Amino acid sequence: MELPANQPRQFYRGGSSIAALRGATDDREFGPEDWVASTTARFGQAESGLSRLPDGRWLRDAVAAAPREWLGPEHVAEFGDSTALLVKLLDAGQRLPVHCHPSDEFARRHLGSRFGKTEAWVVVGTSGPNPVVYLGFRDDVAPEVVDEWVSTQDSSAMLGSLNEIPVQPGDTVLVPAGTPHAIGAGVFIVELQQPTDFSITLEWDGFLADAESAFLGMDHRTALETVNRTGFGDAVLSSLIRRTGGQDAPRVPLLSEQAAPFFGAERLHGAAELAPSFGVLIVLDGDGKLRSDGGDVPVRRGSTVVIPHAAGPARLDGEITAVHCTPPAPWRH
């Protein structure tokens, strides 16, 4: 089923690249995130962020009513009625603040959730003179130093301590839970995440209303336990970053092997067979059809499609470039 745009208001600017991809005229200033096939609500919200199906139901409710049909029996045995996946289009109209996300273990202890928030970025567009992302501290940082930076909101020190990485379309970055990071202005990505909205915002001044909203209701020292303070050298960075822009094979694996317990993504060029699975398809260019037991769905540049497991084997036909996102295989988790 093709889904419409789903752009809950955010605190930072962006959205024009999403509008351009979808061929829309609505490039709202604070619509930088399009939550695609989302069964995850924004933190502290009941419905904001959830996706609706064409028949008006929340996708979350449809999956909960028929999890085996949507997700498959093996997935349900491991993850219940959770899709175990959140996909977004994210268009950074300004630099995002330095932040990080909790691990599964921290989320269980402090947030009552099975899932933390490891994520990955698939760069699909860039603009401006210096499109960059920031990933991990360059050197080990003592806990009292991080505490001081956050307490005094020393933005220049926080940002300056991170690895600055130039990016271009086709680059992909895995962001393990706990990694301090930021996305620079002019970077347009498909973002895969575990299905939560947990962010620890280290650099909140100038972005959020107050510190209270930066730490998910926790005191800041508890929240800072999430931060990986270990420096990321070249070997670590090379294990997390892939450069796939020059690859035009029919199927291009996009993410580091370390992503497999969390999600999967590949870029498809032209006709492709898709195994039965819950999945999200984002069409970057071209037009064609997605054929399955559930019928044919016409797709074109800007289409975002949710695929249930019960659709069976599917086939993408046409001169199309698309990103296909899937949850973790249960046996890899």
Image (spheres, rainbow, N blue to C red):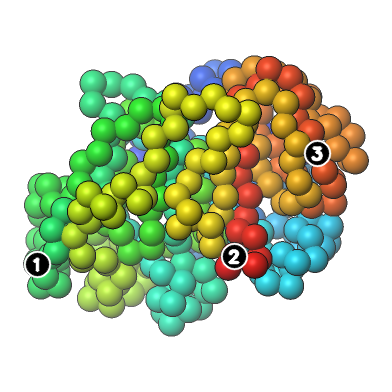
Q: Amino acid at mark 1?
A: Val
293 vs 112, left or right, is right
Which residue is denoted by mark 2 in the rendering?
332
Q: Position of residue 20 (x, y in %)?
A: 51, 20
Q: Residues within 10 Å of mark 3 (few under 14, many from 20)?
A: many
Q: Amino acid at mark 2?
A: Arg
108 vs 141, left or right, is right
Contact (CB < 8 A) between labels 1 and 3?
no
Q: Secondary structure at mark 1?
A: helix
Q: Quadrant of residue 63?
A: bottom right
Tally of numbered discs? 3
Q: Earlier in the sequence, mark 2 or mark 3?
A: 3
Contact (CB < 8 A) between labels 1 and 2?
no
Which residue is denoted by mark 1 in the rendering?
145
Q: Nearer the viewer, residue 234 or 15?
A: 234
Q: Position of residue 127 (x, y in %)?
A: 33, 22
Q: Earlier in the sequence, mark 1 or mark 2?
A: 1
Q: Quadrant of the N terminus?
A: top right
213 vs 40, left or right, is left
- Please give the name of the residue rendered at 36% of the width and 50% of the height, measured from the top-left corner: 240
Picture layout, residue 70 above or below residue 17 = below
Which residue is denoted by mark 3 in the rendering?
314
Picture layout, residue 148 above or below residue 91 = below
Q: Secondary structure at mark 3?
A: strand
Contact (CB < 8 A) between labels 2 and 3?
no
